Amino acid sequence: QVQLVESGGGLVQAGGSLRLSCAASGLTFTDYTMGWFRQAPGKEREFVARISWSGTITYYLDSVKGRFTISRDNAKNTVALQMNNLSPEDTAVYYCAARPGSRIDYPYWGQGTQVTVSS
């Protein structure tokens, strides 16, 4: 079955950086758009970034543009989210998700990794 496993979360001071990684298995990785989402305490889950199967097309939440970069390695079935200049508002559980090209929803999700940014 499809498995998405995130890693790389942790505690960082404001202005710092973290790199999240997501390892995918049980799917043909290049058939999937990959996305990152986050959910802060008391808030709904929100889209953060996504990347096309080829890695050539990316989209970002406006508030993370210029600070976050999504990338993928199709040879290793991994997708990463480089997060720079973090702020306390970025504190959330971050989820990796996979979406086959024929769908607009994300049927596959990881378990999430906690990112905490202290002020």
Image: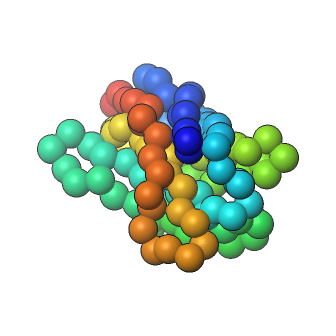
Viewer-proximal residue, 56 or 110? 110
- Give the colour scheme shown: rainbow
Residue extending furthest toward the front: 1
Residue 87 seen anywhere in this rendered image of the structure: no
Residue 56 drawn at (x, y percent): 75, 70
The residue drawn where x is 56% and y is 44% is 2
The residue drawn where x is 63% and y is 62% is 32
Viewer-proximal residue, 23 or 117? 23
Residue 13 drawn at (x, y percent): 44, 27
41 up-or-down from 35: above or below? above
Residue extending furthest toward the right: 75
Query: Which quadrant is home to the C terminus?
Result: top left
75 up-or-down from 32: above or below? above
75 up-or-down from 33: above or below? above
Residue 116 seen anywhere in this rendered image of the structure: yes
Query: Which quadrant is home to the N terminus?
Result: top right
Viewer-proximal residue, 81 or 25? 25
Residue 45 drawn at (x, y percent): 29, 53
Residue extending furthest toward the left: 42
The residue drawn where x is 50% and y is 46% is 96
Viewer-proximal residue, 3 or 86? 3
14 left or right of 6? left
The residue drawn where x is 56% and y is 28% is 8
Which quarter of the picture shows residue 42? top left
